[in-house]
Image (tube, grey):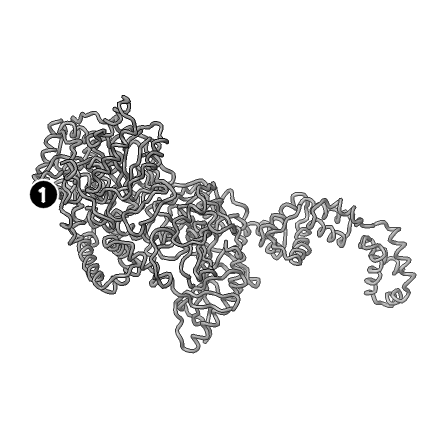
């Protein structure tokens, strides 16, 4: 059986091109790996049946992702296949249509192996908010994989699939990528269609790839971008082959390092790791300079206010009328609404819905929601100013490495503040990538974030790729406890 | 205490675009339940709205027809509340930046012109329909209407009586039909009216507490609802009770309004800009182009009829009140040069015929050039008025050319003087008494003779010739 | 500022169509208070007062669709997920006006 654990998309394509393997070999290997390891990892909510997979194999003909097995986060609609957002309220929901990104991946010849676990409705940073089960970090099964794309990240890091698509509203691709030691990219807002992504924070959400290497990320990204007339917020940007920008040459590239992101309270090991990576980048010819950002005090609040308000409105449609859960033994319509939603939503989702309704209600709208929209303008402009003189911005991806289950559930606010490095990116709609830059003393992965200007994916991919090659930190896979060791 | 009734209206008008506002489903009335739905308009998760370009064009036309300022920047907002006919649990509407602000409509009530202010017009989506299910004692939701584009027209509280409300609604309807943005059929729900009514002491300025009445489904219902509600509130105030601000449902069958159970505890709609949609930014040129290509509106038409065609204002009013009648009038004048004659026919025989047959003036359809030919035949004495009326009815019922109908029905007018004179002489001979009456000074006896001549000639005698010859004979 | 009262939590629960136990009400009161306390730095920020609010980061405007009908789904496909339906429509408990 093919060793899929160490394969990348790039390598798999080479083997397919040389006819050393066939798509069926890759799929069999993926299926076997899922069978071997998902008991422990629990990355998947739904694994497709052999029939469903074979149907796909029989349909594909060619494409940039021909024969490549992948997983989709369970908030991405798949026709007639369960799409639950890891929530009880959608426990039985099968959309009648595919998300635009899924149509594109199908057209590119990819094989979807299944739908992966997540924080319920994408709200969370540890995947502990899933209504179904906890996904484990492949590096240490007693620890979280990060969230909300914990399932997608774990399915890649455990070698089950060669890439996954996740979604990122405040860091939900980048943070689990960092905690699982893989590459996670959030594209510029509007670059990838949101049609078929079950909405959380409509002005913040983007779908993006989770992969083992930066080059894989470039390959997958190229297949999912493009203007979509079904999405009014979809950008009309020229189609780019991102693999062509991976020159490996970053001489003279200017990298900004926001002082406030490297403050005294940053975890020492993480700081050490990032600084080492920065020195490496400098040794490759990049110029790294400190800059200031003024928004650290209010950026997390801005994020939570905007995302919760939009979520409260987006999730109001889950009422038991047209799809999903409907509570039994209810007394009239309003009771049906209340019981359905109370039974169907978890704690964190309820918390954000109420917060969202609070900041939108009359009397509070101006002070909170409107203020947050104003803060967005300031934050976006501040980034714009920085990008006048710099190509990318560097920061840690997350404040810690993978933590143990239950370690952070006490205080929601504490969890929210941990998103400090990732949320400014979504507020401003910028592209950003998290790449592995080493392990901490416990052997847990540390992620470094590179932020680009709008539609600056080429810049961040190029620099990330150059670093990855030079540092050898790409495609470093964990040995899953009880399976690989 | 003398009370003054203060009324403002919120009129919802369905735009007759081919497709719904945010998806490509057909925009069509009637049809099987849930025949015209898709993932977008039933609010399936993951779907997104995309705005129909025609909706903007139609909203601008409506705004221009109502003399509004078209706002060059407007935006869609979410209005959040829960109801089964609202699939996303929010309605996409316009709150802060509506497409039109500040207009007016002039109405004529009891011969007086009154200006009714328009506060704003905004674009929004319609909700589905709820139908009682007798089998389960539940409710069935049909989303065919969900997502149909609406404009909501809000008036200033300038109306004072039920009659004013009726005239306003009819005038508004005529305007919107003129610019062809809706078929405005209250009975099909493409035009709906919510009535906000309050009372205040005559001569004071402060507005009283108002009630809002919904489910007003016809002009007649609007009149009855206003009359009922002003009486209800007057009664309460005279008994020292306070009017509560509430939404009431008008039941036209019983002729009463009832307080509705509130749909939302506190009406906190939590409006915010819809992040799935982007602002609408218009160029003045776009608005100007639409204005230039708009059909002539009733007021401009009326002015032209009065100033250029020397039509009396009364006639102009009646003809311009209906787009179809005005179009017919204009078409007739293309080949026929007497506006007043056409106008007389329209206001007289045509409107009477439509009323008798219970046909809506908007549904009136007849070949104007043929009708003009008919009028020409009358002018040329080929047929008389009575015959022309018969031709008109036939032409309306079955179409056909005036000439052919006259021929087929043998309606040609007889102007032959010798033929008529023969009949006259015979009648005079046979009726010595009326002749005597006439010679004794009873000039009205002429009518008897005219009647007899017409009878003898089977209605074909040229009345003018009859009168001339008759008078000559009788006077001799 | 930052305090959330019991009646506010109950009102929010109704706006959200949620039923909360006594324990949950206490928890959410405290959670929301914490979050809003932290948000004071945003809501008290006077420098933001005269800034234009931004919803769409791309500054897109005028995204429209042509007025052309399309039918891509059958009624059955769209009723398939309904918790209760009579085959023609979605059924809910009786709605009283």
Q: Is residue A377 left or right of residue B460?
A: left
Please, is residue B219 above or below residue B21 in the view?
below
* Image quadrant assignment for residue B471: bottom right
* Image quadrant assignment for residue C8: bottom left
- Who is closer to the viewer here, B70 or A404? A404
How far across and how far down the image is residue A251, in percent?
Answer: 16, 26
**Chain for mark 1?**
A
Q: Which residue is mark 1?
A: A267
- Who is closer to the viewer here, B363 or A312? A312
Asked if one can make out residue B150 in the rendered structure from this viewpoint, the answer is no
Q: Residue furthest top?
A: A18
Q: How many marks?
A: 1
Q: Quadrant of the N terminus of chain B?
A: bottom left
How far across and how far down the image is residue A88, in percent?
Answer: 29, 51
Q: For the residue labelled by badge 1, is the local secondary structure a helix, a strand or a loop?
A: loop
Residue name at image x 39 percent, y 73 percent: B242
Q: Residue furthest right?
A: B429
Asked if one can make out residue B134 in the rendered structure from this viewpoint, the answer is yes
């Amino acid at each position: 059986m093919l060793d899929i654990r160490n394969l990348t998309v790039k390598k798999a394509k080479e083997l397919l091109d040389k006819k050393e393997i066939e798509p069926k070999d890759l799929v069999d290997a993926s299926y076997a790996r899922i069978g071997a390891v998902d008991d422990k990892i629990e990355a998947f909510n739904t694994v497709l049946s052999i029939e469903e997979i074979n149907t796909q194999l029989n349909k594909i003909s060619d494409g940039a992702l021909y024969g490549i097995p992948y997983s989709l986060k369970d908030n991405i609609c798949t026709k007639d296949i369960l799409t639950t957002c890891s929530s009880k309220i959608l426990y039985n929901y099968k959309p009648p249509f595919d998300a635009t990104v899924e149509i594109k991946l199908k057209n590119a010849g990819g094989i979807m192996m299944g739908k992966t676990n997540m924080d319920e409705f994408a709200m969370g940073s540890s995947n502990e908010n899933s209504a179904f089960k906890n996904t484990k970090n492949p590096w240490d099964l007693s620890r979280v994989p990060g969230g909300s794309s914990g399932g997608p990240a774990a399915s890649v890091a455990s070698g089950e699939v060669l890439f996954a698509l996740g979604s990122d509203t405040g860091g939900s691709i980048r943070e689990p990528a960092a905690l699982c030691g893989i590459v996670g990219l959030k594209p510029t807002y509007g670059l990838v269609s949101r049609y078929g992504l079950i909405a959380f924070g409509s002005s913040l959400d983007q779908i993006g790839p989770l992969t083992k290497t930066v080059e894989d990320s470039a390959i997958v990204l190229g297949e999912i971008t493009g203007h979509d007339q079904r999405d009014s917020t979809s950008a009309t940007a020229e189609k780019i082959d991102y693999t062509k920008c991976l020159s490996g040459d970053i001489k003279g590239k200017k990298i900004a390092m926001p002082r406030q992101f490297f403050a005294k309270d940053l975890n020492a090991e993480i700081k050490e790791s990032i600084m080492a990576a920065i020195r490496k980048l400098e040794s490759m010819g990049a110029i790294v300079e400190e800059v200031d950002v003024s928004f650290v005090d209010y950026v997390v609040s801005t994020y939570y206010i905007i995302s919760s308000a939009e979520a409260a409105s987006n999730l109001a449609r889950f009422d038991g009328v047209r799809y999903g859960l409907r509570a039994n033994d209810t007394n009239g319509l309003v009771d049906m609404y209340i019981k359905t939603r109370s039974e169907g939503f978890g704690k964190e989702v309820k918390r954000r819905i109420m917060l969202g309704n609070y900041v939108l209600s009359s009397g509070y709208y101006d002070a909170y929601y409107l203020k947050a929209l104003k803060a967005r303008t300031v934050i976006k402009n501040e980034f714009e100013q920085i990008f006048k003189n710099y190509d990318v911005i560097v920061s840690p991806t997350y404040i810690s490495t993978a933590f143990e289950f239950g370690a952070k559930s006490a205080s929601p606010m504490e969890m929210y503040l941990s998103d400090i490095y990732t949320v400014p990116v979504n507020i401003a709609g910028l592209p950003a990538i998290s790449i592995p830059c080493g392990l901490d003393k416990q052997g847990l992965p540390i992620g470094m974030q590179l932020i680009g200007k709008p539609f600056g994916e080429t810049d961040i991919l190029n620099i990330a790729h150059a670093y990855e090659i030079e540092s050898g930190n790409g495609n470093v896979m964990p040995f899953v406890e009880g399976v690989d060791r | 205490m003398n009370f003054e009734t203060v009324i403002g209206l919120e009129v919802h008008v369905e735009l007759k675009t081919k497709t719904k506002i945010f998806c490509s489903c057909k925009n069509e009335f009637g049809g099987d339940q849930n025949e015209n739905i898709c993932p977008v308009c039933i609010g399936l998760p993951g779907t997104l709205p995309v705005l129909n370009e025609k909706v903007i064009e139609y909203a601008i036309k409506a705004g221009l027809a109502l003399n509004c300022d078209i706002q060059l920047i407007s935006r869609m907002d979410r209005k959040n509340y829960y109801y089964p006919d609202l699939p996303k649990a929010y309605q996409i509407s316009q709150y802060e930046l509506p497409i039109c602000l500040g207009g007016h409509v002039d109405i004529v009530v009891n011969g007086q012109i009154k200006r009714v202010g328009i506060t704003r017009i905004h674009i929004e989506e319609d909700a589905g329909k709820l139908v009682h299910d007798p089998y389960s004692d539940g409710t069935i939701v049909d989303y065919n209407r969900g997502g149909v584009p609406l404009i909501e027209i809000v008036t200033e509280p300038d109306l004072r009586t039920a009659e004013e409300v009726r005239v306003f609604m009819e005038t508004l309807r005529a305007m919107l039909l003129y610019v062809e943005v809706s078929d405005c059929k209250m009975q099909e729900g493409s035009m709906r009216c919510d009535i906000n009514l309050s009372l205040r002491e005559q001569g004071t300025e402060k507005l009283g507490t108002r009630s809002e009445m919904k489910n007003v489904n016809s002009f007649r219902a609007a009149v009855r609802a206003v009359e009922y509600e002003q009486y209800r509130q007057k009664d309460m105030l005279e008994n020292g009770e306070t009017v509560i601000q509430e939404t009431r449902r008008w039941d036209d069958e019983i002729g009463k309004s009832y307080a509705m159970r509130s749909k939302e505890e506190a009406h906190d709609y939590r409006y915010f800009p819809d992040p799935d949609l982007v602002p609408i930014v218009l160029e003045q040129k776009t608005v100007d182009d639409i204005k230039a290509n708009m059909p002539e509106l009733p007021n401009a038409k009326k002015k032209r009829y009065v100033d250029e065609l020397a039509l009396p204002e009364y006639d102009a009013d009646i003809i311009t009140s209906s787009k179809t009648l005005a179009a017919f009038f204009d078409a007739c004048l293309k080949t026929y040069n007497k506006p007043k004659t056409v106008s007389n026919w329209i206001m007289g025989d045509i409107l009477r015929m439509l009323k008798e047959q219970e046909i809506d003036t908007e549904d009136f359809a007849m070949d104007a050039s043929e009708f003009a030919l008919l009028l020409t035949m009358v002018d040329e004495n080929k047929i008389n008025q009575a015959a022309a009326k018969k031709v008109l009815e036939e032409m309306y019922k079955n179409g056909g050319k005036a000439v052919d109908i006259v021929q087929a029905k043998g309606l040609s007018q007889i102007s032959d003087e010798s033929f008529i004179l023969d009949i006259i002489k015979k009648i005079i001979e046979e009726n010595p008494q009326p002749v005597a009456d006439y010679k004794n000074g009873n000039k009205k006896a002429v009518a008897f003779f005219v009647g007899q001549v017409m009878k003898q000639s089977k209605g074909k005698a040229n009345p003018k010739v009859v009168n001339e010859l008759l008078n000559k004979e009788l006077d001799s | 500022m930052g305090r959330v009262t019991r009646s506010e939590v109950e009102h929010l629960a109704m706006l959200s169509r949620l039923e909360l136990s006594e324990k949950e009400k206490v928890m959410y009161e405290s959670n929301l208070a914490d979050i809003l306390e932290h948000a004071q730095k945003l809501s008290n920020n006077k420098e933001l007062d005269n800034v234009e609010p931004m919803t769409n980061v791309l500054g897109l405007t005028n995204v429209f669709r042509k007025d052309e009908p399309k039918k891509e789904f059958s009624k059955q496909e769209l009723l398939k997920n309904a918790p209760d339906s009579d085959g023609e429509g979605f059924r809910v408990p009786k709605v009283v006006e």
